[in-house]
Amino acid sequence: MHRTGDLYGHFQTLEQQKESATLGMWIFLVTEVLFFGGLFLAYTINRSAFSTAFGIGSNTLDITLGAGNTVVLIMSSLTMAMAVWSAQVGKKKLVSFFLIATLGLGTVFLGVKAIEYKQKVDHHLIPGRGFDMKYHPAHPMAGDNLEELALEKEEVDKAFAVDPDINFHGQLYFSLYFGMTGLHALHMIVGAGLLVWLIKGSFASRFTPQYNTPVEIVGLYWHFVDIVWIYLFPLLYLIDRHR
Amino acid sequence: MSEHIVSPKIYIAIFAALMLGTGITVWAAFQNFHQFNIVIALVIATIKATLVVLYFMHARYSSKRTQLVIVCSVFWLAIMLALTLTDYDTRSHETQPGVSHFAKPVPSHFWSV
């Protein structure tokens, strides 16, 4: 394709090119909003239909890890925004620094997510034939708080009295939990790949006050993934803590 | 379109607001506001999302055309949520607390396949 410097042949100015890229990215993000929106909708309907099972399922999640990950992800959004700023004002070394920081924080998020998934495997909370919400309260693991676990057992027993099919309905909660957080994590992995590409570019001093469209556009994507988590965290982790 | 550069001061202020919002969400989740717990959680999440869109994603400084696309996404999402939920909501009523009519008994052969 014909291009002069960073300006592709079918644009007249860099500003026009950036405006087109931004608009295109936003149109993609609209489709993403509706994509995740459908999952949130499925979650809402099932939660209202099986509120007992969803409450018990939600309370098995680790709130410290969830809240910690929220902080990590919002921090990574800040460093991403700072990378855009650094490019805009021409501080080339800072661009690399903030992009690497963003990638690092994103990796921490995925690592914590992996720890959470591992816990669910250990607690027999993966949808399928081994799924049993009574398993973990009856089989304490090393490092468990036994008092909390006794409370959890009481809660689960009460829930079984209300909803005898809770092991069936609980699988709906965990299917949605793994589906939604898994899709979110997949977006993070794609974002991490894009960041690696940007970091390579920043080492070659590709991004300047005149041309920083890729940083800006990947930034839009990264912030969108942050927004999805801003909704996932309260809906998945916090819905039933007040009881 | 001349480029608007958002200063680090604004980014850090927004970051602080997002942290505060996260703190309030976690605190509010442990208080009993009855049916309003979910409303409070969603209102705070929406305020946080709006801050991210306006400042981190520069929507406040974008062209009118880009802003229109952003508003459209919210509008279409609202259509999908509102029409689907009203449909589900008007079909029938809950049969017992915690389990609605969707919760059909699991066939006995389900676990023994």
Image: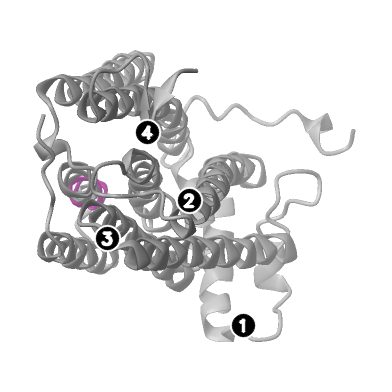
Nearer to me, B61 or B72: B61
Q: Work out whether mark 4 precedes mark 1 in sequence or the reverse, and give the earlier one.
A: 4
Kindly report the distance in space between the C-alpha atoms of the residues bearing marks 1 and 2. 46 Å
Q: Give above or below for A39 relative to A147.
A: above
Query: Residue B87: percent from the left, percent from the top?
Result: 35, 13
Q: CA distance from mark 3 to mark 2?
A: 16 Å
The amino acid sitting under disc 3 is: Met
Q: Which residue is mark 3?
A: A82
| Percent x, y of residue B5 | 13, 49
Give yes or no for contact between labels 4 and 1 (Cβ–Cβ under 8 Å). Answer: no
Q: Which residues are magenta?
A: B37-44
Q: Are marks 1 and 2 on the same chain?
A: yes
Q: Nearer the viewer, mark 4 or mark 1?
A: 4
Numbered disc 4: secondary structure: loop
Label 4 in the same subunit as label 3:
yes
Residue at disc 3, secondary structure: helix
Q: CA distance from mark 4 to mark 2?
A: 13 Å
Q: Amino acid at mark 4?
A: Asp
Q: Quadrant of residue A139?
A: bottom right
Using the image as rendered, state which of residue A114 and residue A155 is in the foreground. A114
**Mark 1 Cα within 10 Å, few/some/many (few <14, many 20+)?**
few
Mark 3, chain letter?
A
* Closer mark to the observer between disc 3 and disc 2: 2
Upstream in the sequence, badge 4 or badge 3? 4
Q: Is residue A74 left or right of residue A191?
A: left
On-image quarter of the N terminus of chain B: top left
